[in-house]
Image: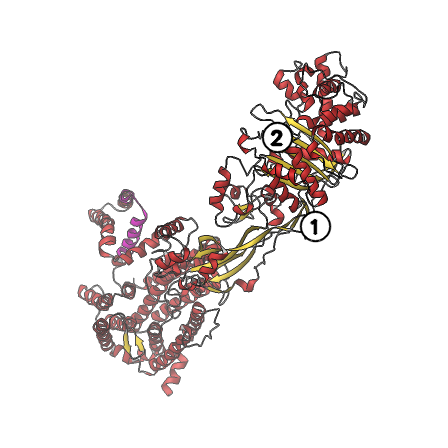
Amino acid sequence: MNEGRKEIIRALVVLTGLVFLVKLFFIQILDDRYAQLADSNSILKEIEYPFRGLIYDRNGKLLVYNSPEYDLLIVRKEIGNFDSAAFCKIFDLTREELRLKFKELRARKEYSPVKPTLFIRQLSNYDFAKIQEHIDEFPGFYIQPRTTRAYTTHSLANALGYVSEISKTQLENDSTKIYRQGDYIGQSGIEAQYEHVLRGKRGVRFKLRNVSGIEKGSFKNGEFDTLSVPGNDLITTIDLDLQEYGEQLLKGKVGSLVAIEPSTGEILSMISGPSYDPTLLTGRKFSSNFMLVSSDTTKPLFTRPLMAMYPPGSIFKIVQTLIGLQEGVLRPDTRFPCDRSVVNCHNHPNPCDLHMAVQYSCNPYFHQAFRRIINQNKSPNTFIDSRIGLENWHSYVTRFGLGQPLGVDLPSEKGGQMPTSTLYNRIYGEGRWKFSTIYSLAIGQGEMLITPVQMANLAAIMANKGYYFTPHLVKEILGSEQQPVVTKHETGIKPEYFAFVQDAMSDAIYGTAQRAVIPGIELCGKTGTAQNPHGYDHSVFMAFAPKDNPKIAIAVYVENAGWGGRAAASIASLMIERYLTGEVKRLALQEYVMKGDFLDKVTQTPSTE
Amino acid sequence: MRRQEDISGKMDWLTVLIYLVMVLLGWLNIYAAVYDETVHPSIFDLSLNSGRQLIFIAVSGIIILAILVVDMRFYEAAAYLIYGVVLFLMVLVLVVGKEVGGNKAWLGFGSFGGQPSEFAKFATALVVAKFIGSIGFRMDNFRNQVILFAMVGIPMVVILAQKDTGTALVFTAFVLVFFREGMSPFLMIVGIASAFIFILTLLVENELYLYGGIGVILIISILAGKKKIKRIALLTLGALAVAGVIQSVDYVITDVLKPHQQNRIRALINPDADPLGYGWNVTQSKIAIGSGGFSGKGFLEGTQTKFDFVPEQSTDFIFCTIGEEHGWLGSLVVIGLFVTLLLRVVYLAERQKNRFARVYGYSVASIFFFHFAINIGMTIGLFPVIGIPLPFFSYGGSALWGFTILLFTLLKLDAHRGQVLQRL
């Protein structure tokens, strides 16, 4: 009977071997988990952060660069009994703060006692110098260099935008899977718009490390390592000198200023007032400063030139003039009396022809002119006739780049509003509105909103006699095959009509904007005073110069500054003088402008819808 | 000289070959386990385990020669003497060890140290074989059974006193020998069933399911066979015993086992519960082996064992290096070698002409089997972590010598199996 038992013992041996092989087959071949776990155990991924692309102005002046900063990393397991008092002293922490840091550390999801983990972020150069001497005294702490944004100027904040750590939502919505937690990303302005060229490519070095986190050489001799590729530098269209000067002029005012080179569509300066100092939103103090800036009631983060929408006021009369001429319903010798029964006006020679009407900005004239544009007797029904007229008119204003975003290379540009028949049908009902319902449009009021950049673009169209290039901020992406594409847009209105209006604008300076006159430079401009039911009127001015070879087209909008001939025209004129001659000789005017402070008159922030 | 030539013709060279391959593979894997890429040390470096293992292997060669030279009758004749000496040394270790502190199972002669408990397996195998092989021995004699268990139990108790639970458990392997020599399988079945139920109790959260399961099995067993009173009573008694085991689990876990032993069992049940704490060994060991894939990462290319993620990587967890660097194929080779060796040893034992040699052969097979099953089982998470070496692979002089002596004494006896016949 015992003879059979040797077979049982043999079977036991073979069975054990088989069980082992089956189990091994499962964990070694069928289950990938262990291979991944082994990699995360022993392969340390060292990220080499790329240099973000630099940003220059149009004359090659550096605007934005990178400055080194240092993150303090911790490997919990390597820390022995460390001198927390000395640590607190060097890192400028209280005991309580240190305790909190450790608590935070342990609470983190990706926390591992053997992997380097972020402990203190963004130590400045100064802190680093202090700490570097002592870092050896604290085993388990390491310093990782990376860079933060730095600025040569305190202006241009809104156009440049800022860079900050990627947010949770952004990370979740990132379909490219390029970003990791803790990465920096452009949040607004050029930094956001050109994020894909500025960011560069992250480098990775794979290193082997043992259970204590100590490096044990490169993984497969660096076969999978990649070097970081710096981001592309940008040359912007901004003239830093003009920009800084303009920001000084706009100090203490709420408003916008946009200057464009008409022949190219390049934005020379783009000012949003009040703004903030770009150097605030960088480095270790980012969070506390961001709180300050974003909670400021004057909304410095709001990019007014692109996002604020205003009624254009009288400057819109030149658009009406051009449409009337092209339609053949107005002629240079068309005269209307200054009949103030419907709209008010101010004192000027009466009656006016078209030239004078633009020059003196006669409201009743344009009321009647607009009636001719809208009601051309295309239908015996005045309601239908008005609808046809408005649709025709709308197709014109659209070609002036109004009513929809121009396509400026910055995020969140607004389109403004140019009323369509659909809009009025919604408000009044179909067939229930006619010219007398919508006549406010004649003088740039009513259901009409445009952005400051559209105003400046309008000035550029005037300067170019009928066409414009999409206004843009970036001229060139250095070292890239993909360059910004600028498209030319035609209004389809005859250049001779523009020449006519230019003459009127040239004379208008002497009629409504005496202050804008620059000795030796022929300037064409148009004032506007947009009625503001909430308080003081907004002051508007658009201009270009010189008349025969325009180099700069500009629009200035100052909220609550009253009549356009004063604040807005003065600022625009000083900017033109500065840009064309390189200096300002009219110091009295400059002083007058800089003293003007309308902030206390601001009762209403501009509508964003 | 003449006698030695006689032996060489009758040696079982297959076993010798397997032995040599295993020792060589073991040596290479010890080197891989402790290899440091940043230093590129030599395999002969005496400051490394691989360098020292080579010395141990060389000493093993001398031991083998000595075993072969000694008269084959010595082993049977001196069995009790050897057993006594080893027991004495182990007790000495207990005493001296206490004076020294620290090393509990180690006996030091200057810088040369050894673990007598490794040799206790050999000594016990000899006495068990001699006792069972004695004229007129009957396994069904209760007194004989008591003596056998005492022979195995005494070294076990001494080793337990040295706090070396793993080595002590090895002695339970003798149950296999007793089974082969005619002892009722009842003991083995009860032992295995208890262990099985013990673990099952830990796995199943609600004990009522287990009691229900036992009830169902009991009823089916009663209905399936002859309905004799005695049989039904026996079955019911067995069921009650099983229920008792379930009841005792909680008590055993919390009151009998030491905290680290409790954790090892918990790690087996659910290693993910505390992967950085008590689950660390099992988790890391499985990661190392599991990451090897089909053909492994290559010699010296492993990361988990080399970089100390796996503890004891050159001794008890040497199989991790094999699994990581040589993958499933390498594991297949090693497991294949062990299965072949074990089957060969059983074959050798069965072809012995006298009972002493056969029982001794089975003792060797049982001890090797226990080490093989428990060691590899623990590295791949099938058994709780029990610190015993993998024969011929794990680093360590005493262990290597102990296994070498066990194996080559059998080969010596085997080579002379013809003479035994002549003598009778």
Amino acid marked by disc 2:
Met
Q: Residues in magenta?
A: B189-213
> What's under tag 1, amino acid-wise?
Glu
Residue A440 position in % (x across, y down): 66, 20
Main SS category, magenta section = helix
**Which residue shows up at 40% across the image and 73% down it?**
B49
Residue under the image location 43 percent in, 56 percent down: A22
* 3D distance between C-alphas at marks 2 and 1: 36 Å
Task: Give coordinates of residue A191: x percent, y percent.
Answer: 59, 45
Residue topped by disc 2: A309
Pointer 1 residue = A481
Q: In the rendered view of the protein, which quadrant contains the N terminus of chain B?
A: bottom left
Considering depth in this image, is B156 or A58 the residue closer to the camera?
A58
- Would residue A165 be seen by someone viewing this image from the given angle? no
The secondary structure type at the circle numbered 1 is loop
Is residue B196 located in the magenta-colored stretch of the structure?
yes
**Image-quadrant location for residue A411:** top right
Name the front one of labels 2 and 1: 2
Disc 2 is placed on an element classified as loop
Mark 2 neighbour class, 10 Å CA radius: few under 14, some 14 to 19, many 20 or more: many
Q: Is residue B319 left or right of residue B70?
A: right
